[in-house]
Amino acid sequence: MTLILGIETSCDETAAAVIEDGHKIRSNVVASQIELHRQYGGVFPEMASRQHVIALTPVIEQAMKEAGARWEDLAAIAVTHGPGLAGSLLVGVNMAKGLAYGRGLPLIGVNHIEAHVATNWLDVATPGASIPPFPLLALIVSGGHTELVLMHDYGRYERLGSTIDDAAGEAFDKVARLLGLDYPGGPAIQRAAEGGDANRFEFPRARVEGRYDLSFSGLKTAVLRQVQKYDPSLERPADRLPGAEAAQAKPKLPPQLVADMAAGFQKALVGALIEKTCLAVQDFAVNGVLLAGGVGANRALREALAASLKVPLRMPPVRLATDNATGVGVVGYWRWQRGQFSGWDLDVLPRLKLGE
Ligand code: KG4
Ligand code: ZN
């Protein structure tokens, strides 16, 4: 039995998990900073890293305790070292280095995007569906990333396309702000859209040159134009106002209008993701699709993917789609099996990519 401790601090969740043999969750502890950042309408980087400093030690201690693991039971310590907020990543990486050095354990730096994809290997992902053989297609949709990546093998990725402007989660967050909904915008829009008519507003689907690329900034602007029709006082896009000011600048819109716009926006965004995913599935004859990232929690997206794909689909459960450390432990296991360890010079890479 191999136990890996995973640590994740790339954005606004302080997280640690103990993973057994790369697929079983022994513990999964997430301390979310959402309440702290909500007043600013988004993540405030300085505060995020300071909060990680406060929360990380108790989070790791709790993860070890819940796993019933002693330090000598661990095979390695894996930590997210990019992409993400530099200051936040530094807290996790330095903690992992200190613990690994002090306990004489191997250190493994993990790509945050790969960790999202790896949550599909956990026993709790899409119960009953086994993982099809490679090549697989990963659709990664989070607050910072929107990418279609071919997975040829463990650790071997080929990026097919990505967003040329806003990430899918970023679009949810910005449009939520325009509609006067709370941060984070994804869950708020999903909730609002439930009572909405997705066909009242026809929001455009961007034409993008790259066959597998996506674009969401035009969609966001289209929502803004509609909002301005009802509330002309909203002259500037709320997402251009500085932090707290933007969070306060809530438009006054009738609830049904908000619901209809949320539903129309969600439909357009999900439609674009499905179109490009299906194209890539066809072109590369993959054996399955792996959904990953915070927007992967979106019910409309999950249902549309399940209905449109002609190959098996794996999805992490909703609670593991948003940031946590379980995937870090899974990737850590893949690396441990291959003896691929990081040196003590492991550094944070805020712009790290997957598959380039
Ligand atoms: O993966 P994640 O937790 O952090 C990053 O690595 O960015 O993703 C966070 C993003 C946020 O933009 C949030 O609004 C979005 O995921 N999100 C959702 C839902 N839950 C979270 N978007 C749409 N529908 C949801 N249910
Ligand atoms: Zn993430």
Image (cartoon, rainbow, N blue to C red):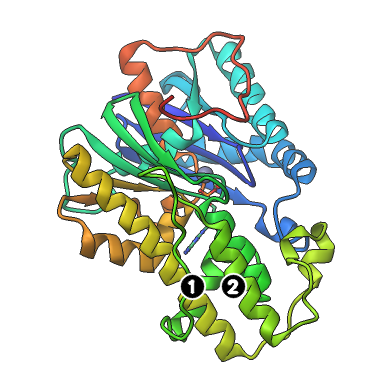
Q: Quick one: label 1, few (<14), some, or many (20+) residues within 10 Å? A: many
Does residue 253 appear anywhere in the picture? yes
From the viewer's perspective, is 265 left or right of 124? right
Decide: marks 1, 2 in contact (CB < 8 A)? yes
Please provide percent x and percent y for residue 11.
63, 42
Choose top left, top right, bottom left or bottom right for residue 235. bottom right
Question: Amino acid under label 1?
Answer: Phe
Which numbered disc flags the more N-terminal residue, 1 or 2?
1
Q: CA distance from mark 1 to mark 2?
A: 7 Å
From the viewer's perspective, is 21 left or right of 99? left
> Quadrant location of the N terminus?
top left
- Name which residue lies at 21% across and 33% down: 135
Q: Which residue is mark 2?
A: 223
Q: Which residue is mark 1?
A: 203
Would you place residue 29 above or below residue 307 in this image?
A: above
Q: Quick one: label 2, few (<14), some, or many (20+) residues within 10 Å? A: many
Mark 1: is the Cβ under 8 angstroms from ligand 1? no
Q: Nearer the viewer, residue 53 or 314?
A: 314
Please provide percent x and percent y for residue 232.
76, 82
